[in-house]
Image (cartoon, rainbow, N blue to C red):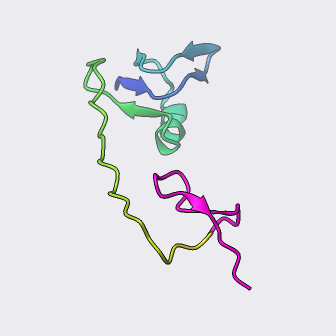
Amino acid sequence: MPQYRVLTGIDYPPDKRAEKDALVSDIPEKSAKWLLEQGLIELSDGKTAKAEPVIEAAPEVTFDPHATDGDKDGYIQDGTEFQRPVEETN
């Protein structure tokens, strides 16, 4: 029987439960098919070690004199060191 790594806690027949990162080999084939399709389990090589997370560098933010208030909250360049209130222009 294939072995699967559980990606999120699941209940499966008959009345069983597996938590995240558990290795299981008793999931019925019919259930395994849709659990794989939904991304709730994955085929396992039998190891419990997780892959290292990929950390991407945040893009460099620069002052934008022409920034717009896309979310209409009254501020431009939200969440950056350049955040500032929208200036009213009449």
Which quarter of the picture shows residue 54?
A: top left
Q: Give me the residue at 52% from left, 61% from top.
A: 77
Residue positioned most to the right: 90
Quadrant of the rendering where the N terminus is positioned: top left
Residue positioned most to the top: 16
Which quarter of the picture shows residue 12?
A: top right
Residue positioned most to the bottom: 90
Mainly helix, strand or loop, the magenta region? loop
In the visual, does 45 lie left or right of 28? Answer: left
* Picture layout, residue 64 above or below residue 15: below
Residue 11 drawn at (x, y percent): 61, 21
Residue 29 drawn at (x, y percent): 48, 31
Quadrant of the rendering where the C terminus is positioned: bottom right
* Picture layout, residue 57 above or below residue 63: above
The answer to if 46 sits in the magenta stretch is: no
Residue 19 drawn at (x, y percent): 52, 17
The answer to if 83 sits in the magenta stretch is: yes
Q: Which residues are magenta?
A: 70-90
Q: Give me the residue at 70% from left, 61% from top.
A: 73
Depth check, front residue: 42 or 50: 50
* Picture layout, residue 42 above or below residue 6: below
Depth check, front residue: 85 or 55: 85
Depth check, front residue: 44 or 33: 44
* Picture layout, residue 66 above or below residue 59: below
Q: Give me the residue at 71% from left, 75% from top.
A: 88
